[in-house]
Amino acid sequence: MRKKRKAFTLVELLVVISIIAVLLAILMPSLQKAREQAKKVVCSGNMRQMGVALQCYIQENDYHLPVGHSCNVDDPNRYWLKVLCKYLKQDLLFQCSADTAKDFVDWNRPLAEQTGRRWSSFAINGLLEPQQGYDSLKKIKKPQYCVYVCEKPSTPNWASVDHIHPDKWLGNISLAKANVAYNRHLGKSNYLFADGHSQTFEIEKR
């Protein structure tokens, strides 16, 4: 006598599929949050490395801050982030893993051919330039409270802009949020301060 083969019925198969679908629905938000948390950690670590490089730079340059955003430098090697890279054994990330923008420059191609594209995911404080008179820690009363670098928005209008003018915000929290990627990392963002320390926090009205 032939043994009768056991097999799943259609009903049993549908039940199994339904259970898997329910489990996925439960787990997906947690997995997504874990992925976003990982991106936040990577970006935060990158910002800390920027801070280490910045501290090395200011010690070597009589407490002056590196200057040069893409609007006022012709040589890409004078770009502030390129300058900081020289003080580390590892490469800094120019694009945050949570930055959804696609229009970044290819550093292996001539930059003159890539006008209007992003140089990085970050923006520096436009007030900390020589022409503004605040390019040195000696001129800043509390550098530990002065933001030097923030994360910039991913929107197209920020493609060719990589510095901010916080003096024009005049305490306007909405304008500040429009100029900073304030919620890139689970409602928070990373910042590098003029003294070289970095911090992750949420923008809030005080």
Image (cartoon, rainbow, N blue to C red):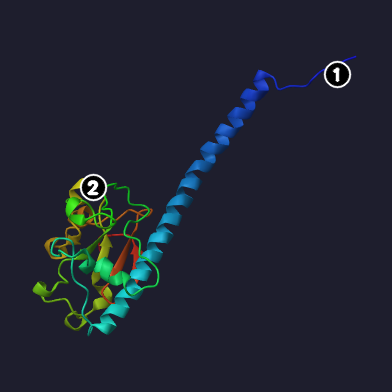
Total marks shown come to: 2
Q: Is residue 197 visible?
A: no
Name the residue at 13% across, 65% down: 167
Instruction: State which quarter of the image contains the C terminus.
Output: bottom left
Residue under label 1, please give it: 3
Instruction: State which quarter of the image contains the N terminus.
Output: top right
Lower sequence index among marks 2 and 1: 1
Name the residue at 21% across, 69% down: 78
Measuring from the top left, give residue 80's x and y in whole percent: 23, 68
In the image, 206 versus 28, the foreground residue is 28
Please, what is the three-letter code of the amino acid marked with disc 1? Lys
Q: SS for tag 1? A: loop
Left or right of 173: which side holds 51? Answer: right
Quarter-of-image position of residue 87:
bottom left
Q: CA distance from mark 2 to mark 1?
A: 66 Å
Quarter-of-image position of residue 54:
bottom left
Residue under label 2, please give it: 155
Q: Are marks 2 and 1 in contact (CB under 8 Å)?
A: no
